[in-house]
Every structure is written in C-alpha cells, then in structure tokens.
Amino acid sequence: MNKLLKSMLAALALVSLGAAHSAVITFDGVADSPFAPYLTGGTGLLGHGDEFYQSGFWIDPFSNAAVAQPGDLVGAIVDGTDVAATCFSVACPNNNSTNFFAGLDDGVLAIGAVNGNSFKVKGFDASFLGAAGDTFPATAGFLRLQGVTAGNVAITQTYALPGPGSSAFNFNSYNTFGTFAATDFALVYVYTFACNNVGTCSAFSTDKGQFALDNFRTTDIPEPQTWLLMGVALAGAAVARRRRA
C-alpha cells in the first residue's frame, strides 16, 4: 500500500469519527431532571422552564401564553406501563409500554442539540391527548413541527392525529418528508392544534392542544472540522485517480 493511499485511509477514518449519526429521544431515564421532586408513580410533571436533557439534546417545554409564569403546567413524563394511574384526567394512548412525553394545556416543546450543532428530524411517534370523557372527531388534532435553521429560516410540517375511534388513543409512527426532512435545523418546536366536532382546529387558545410524543428520531450534522477532513480525503482520492491515469 503506497503512502498516499495510507494517508487517504487515515483521513477517512478521522472523518468517520465525526460523521453524522442518529440519535433518538425516548424520554426514558430522565429522573435526574429538574422536575424530579414532582415524580409520582412514574409521572413527572413539567412546568414552564423545566428543561431536561437526553441523547445529546436539551428539551424545553414551555407555555405560549401571553403572560407565562415559571411552573405553569405544560407537560409530563408518563409511564406507559400504567397510563390509567399516571395520566389522571387525560385520555392517554395505551399502546406504549415505555415512558413518553405528554404536552399539556397548549404547551410547546423546544428541542436543540447541547453542542450547538444543527440536526435533521427523521421521524417520531405521536398521539393526540384529550380530556377523559370528551368526545372527539375523526381527526382530533394536528401536530406541527416548526424547524428553525441557523440562519433563522422557519419551516413547518403538519401531521393529522386521529381520534380514539371506539377504543383508546394510540401512538402512530410518522416520518418527515420533502424539504423539511432535508433541512438542517438549529432547533425544533413541537405543538398541537385541537379540533372540535365541527372541524374547527386551533392552537394556543383552548388549553386542549395536547399531544403524546416518543422516539423523536434525529440525525446530527458533523462538526465543521469534519467537513475539512472529508475534503482532504476526497482530494487524496482524486490525486490517486490522476496518478493511475
């Protein structure tokens, strides 16, 4: 093996160390988060400003109210093994046996990488959450992702969340697509529109915009120095081709 080829392979090895990788936010194992004192029966209540961390991401549920106060209820971490005990007066999905995030009372969830890198969103599992005893239309609501790029450009993608039908709400798996799936975001907001029985859907005005979220799937973007190494490796490959020509 000649010296040029060895150098090229070494550069490629370094590139692989910093290359893009997948991360999944599962909401499991977050008992050390700021809301730990409120954990009861597997449910951690989340107030406005209760940021926590998982899989290299900061996760910040907050209120979109005009006058939001620290501690205003905006979410919870729910133990899916016993939703009857942990969801209280909320109709939660019953087909998830792990922890999941419940966005409550028109709350918004913000997600960003701790290291400041941009990232792509690949997909997630989600369900609508309703008040126990309410009736719901076939489409109970719409979950919206609003991604913001490092250049402060916002792109949204919206997903229909079905009602419970004749049984309970259920998680469904969703994949991003098109421009949204291809875009690198500095942060992503997640929130919900609630729909009534006449088909009117609204966000931030009824306290009924509620959602369950799990397995939020992302792809990190390499650090800037990784792109430099990749350029070196590709340049080396080009030189090798010219020498063989």
Image: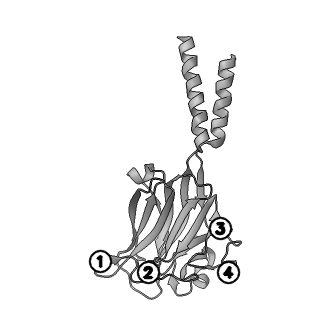
- Front of the two marks 2 and 3: 2
- Judged from the image, the secondary structure of the residue bearing numbered disc 2 is loop
- Judged from the image, the secondary structure of the residue bearing numbered disc 3 is loop
- Of the numbered discs in the image, which one, if any, rests on residue 28? 3
Q: Residue at x 57, y 12 (%)?
A: 243
Q: Residue at x 54, y 17 (%)?
A: 241
Whether label 4 touches label 2, CB < 8 Å: no
Q: Is residue 200 visible?
A: yes
Figure check: 179 above or below 85: above
Q: Is residue 97 visible?
A: no
Figure check: 34 above or below 16: below
Of the image marks 1 and 3, the number of the one nearer the N terminus: 3
Label 2 to label 3, Cα distance in Å? 31 Å
Whether label 4 touches label 1, CB < 8 Å: no
Residue 204 in percent (x, y) is at: 41, 78
Label 4 to label 2, Cα distance in Å? 28 Å
The residue where tag 1 is placed is 199
The residue where tag 2 is placed is 66
The residue where tag 4 is placed is 39
Residue 6 in percent (x, y) is at: 69, 23
- Front of the two marks 4 and 1: 4
As rendered, which of 132 and 227 lies closer to the eye?
A: 227
The kind of residue on which mark 3 rests is Asp
Q: Residue at x 67, y 82 (%)?
A: 38
Of the image marks 4 and 3, the number of the one nearer the N terminus: 3
Residue 111 in percent (x, y) is at: 54, 63
As rendered, which of 155 and 167 lies closer to the eye?
A: 155
The kind of residue on which mark 4 rests is Leu
